[in-house]
Amino acid sequence: MKKKLIILFAIVLIFATGCRQAPQDEVPPPAPETPQAEENVDRELTEELVAEDEVINGQVYEQDDVVIGTMIIEEGVSQEDIDRIANKYADQLKEKYPNKRVNVQAVQGGQNVANIMLE
């Protein structure tokens, strides 16, 4: 009886794994256009942002009715300095884009350390 169960289990296992067909020459769909598409980037403010000593990288771009500023902050920068920089760019974006909502986000060590929304 035990031998029959093992044989039955082996047959089921063979059919379960052997009957699956791998996709043949499957072409992935084209990637959707990213919100940071080249024409939506504010190059001037992006360059100014990444020139900040505390900022490792970042970007300012438009997406629909929102202007977004993202920045990666160096380790060791105080929360006070992070808030100062984030608020500085939120104010600049709102001044430059008065009819759009503004969202400025800062990340440090993989954690979101600032998220400012201005209507």
Image (tube, rainbow, N blue to C red):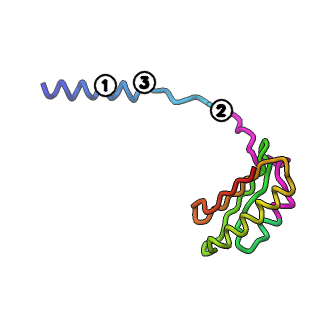
Residues rendered magenta in the picture: 28-47
Marks 3 and 1: CB-CB under 8 Å?
A: no
Between disc 3 and disc 2, the foreground one is 2
Residue picked out by circle 3: 19
Q: Left or right? Give the position of 102 relative to 16.
A: right
Residue picked out by circle 2: 27
Residue 90: x %, y % from top left:
76, 59
Name the residue at 65% across, 72% down.
80
Residue 40: x %, y % from top left:
83, 48
Residue picked out by circle 1: 12
User: Which of disc 2 and disc 3 is earlier in sequence?
Assistant: 3
Name the residue at 78% across, 65% down.
49
Q: In this view of the protein, which residue sits in the foreground, 77 or 1? A: 77
Crowding at label 3, few (<14), some or many (≥20) Cα neighbours within 10 Å?
few
Q: Left or right? Give the position of 66 relative to 110.
A: right
Q: Which element type, helix, strand or loop, lies under badge 2?
A: loop
Name the residue at 77% across, 66% down.
88
Residue 18: x %, y % from top left:
40, 27
